[in-house]
Amino acid sequence: MAAGYLDILRARHAARLLAGTLVGRLPNGTAPIAIVLFTRAEGGSYSLAGALAAVYGLATAVGQPLLGRAVDLYGQPRVQLPAAVVSALGMAVLALAGLGSLPLAYAAVVVAGLFTPPLEGGLRALWPSVLGREDRVHRAYAMDAVAQEIMFTAGPLLVTALVAVWSPAAALLVINVIGVLGALSVVLSEPSRAWRSAPREAHWLGALRSPGLLALLGSFFFVGLALGSITVAGVAYADDHGREAVYGWLMAALGLGALVGGTVYGARQWSGAPERRLRAVVALLALGYLPLTLTPSVPAMIALMALAGVFLAPAIACSFIVVDRHAPRGTVTEAFSWLVTTFGVGAAVGTAAAGPAVEAGGTSWSFAVAGAGGVAALLVLLTTGKVLEVPGRTAVAAHGSENDRNGAVEPGFSSGHQA
């Protein structure tokens, strides 16, 4: 199992790009947690915490495709690093000014979210030029999903540790400084400086002119909603049990489950259409969210959270391949950024909905939001099966280009145009 991943990491620049992207995305990956803990420490309500996290998520959702398109047009260094610095400054304003002025607090999270650099989409755009062979690119997508779960496992623990040692405000500042350093490492690398997007057809919709991509984004809106609601529901559960550290362990368990699932998923080559496999994986993901509404004892809840996370990384890894198969040529960073955006919008809606759900019906209701999100994600994939089944002609790029969809296709798929 480990041999395939080691082969990827031994490739020149691969380890640096993966680590830099992982560190650079830490502020975005932990922002909902950090914002909720900061707001509660400042005396804010669950609803305010959810609202601030939701605004941050919505601002990220707006900024990601815009910055992703800018990366496709102007290259990575000219966009990624300035965006990371501005985003960190926005979060610093929130940490230093507090909640004394709510308009300023909302403005700060808007700036922080809007300028979150599209490092995630940028990394996936770099893999074909760094790794070459399609089987290695496919495995890199799975490793990418696994690496995200390392962040989602370690991130909550890091935030809660910083809060315990210093304060929630210090946690916000430290996490964002680390993020800027990660972005700097990526944009100074040779592949990032040399990368250029493939030629693209001028179209105001960009990547969104692909019906298959739209169907995928619709499903992952609800996956994001489920995860966003769990962020708030986990805090409520920890409060119910009188221990703030419980929250970190719940989020770490969710990430650990996804880490295990993604590692196993990426260790083998899969046959058959990834669109069909995605439906099966999302069905299992939805099934894992439903038992969370039981809110049992802490050890049992940690186990349920780990189980709920098992199919998250496989769903994400499979979605990367579907994006590659359906996104129009020359929109590689933008297309992946739209996936991040959809996830962010869904997470924002989930955090906004979970706060009132806690206050209206207790912790169980907020976890029910996650279960509903998982079921809705599956229903979208089932009802759009024909649209997703075969990539359209706009999804195929010239073999060997920086935006080569076929470099990410699994064995069994031809590199020509498909009907």
Image: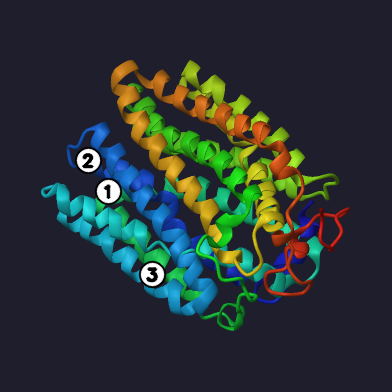
Q: Secondary structure at mark 2?
A: helix
Q: Could you give the CA–CA distance between mark 2 and mark 3, rounded to whole angstroms?
A: 28 Å
Mark 1 belongs to which amino acid?
Pro
Q: Does the rendering let one see residue 98?
A: no
Residues at badges 1 and 2 in contact (C-beta under 8 Å)? yes
Q: Nearer the viewer, residue 60 or 259?
A: 60
Label 2 belongs to which residue? 41
Residue 306, placed above or below residue 409: above
Give the Cα distance between marks 1 and 2.
7 Å
Residue 211 vs residue 135, the one in the foreground: 211
Disc nearer the start of the sequence (1/2) = 2
Residue with the mark numbered 3: 83
For disc 1, the neighbor class at 10 Å (few under 14, some 14 to 19, many from 20) is many
Q: CA distance from mark 1 to mark 3?
A: 23 Å
Q: Quadrant of residue 196?
A: bottom right
x, y percent for residue 326: 68, 55
What residue is disc 1 on? Answer: 168
- Res. 159 mark: none
Residue 30, x across and y down, in percent: 41, 50
Q: Residue at x 79, y 58 (%)?
A: 4
Mark 3 secondary-structure assignment: helix
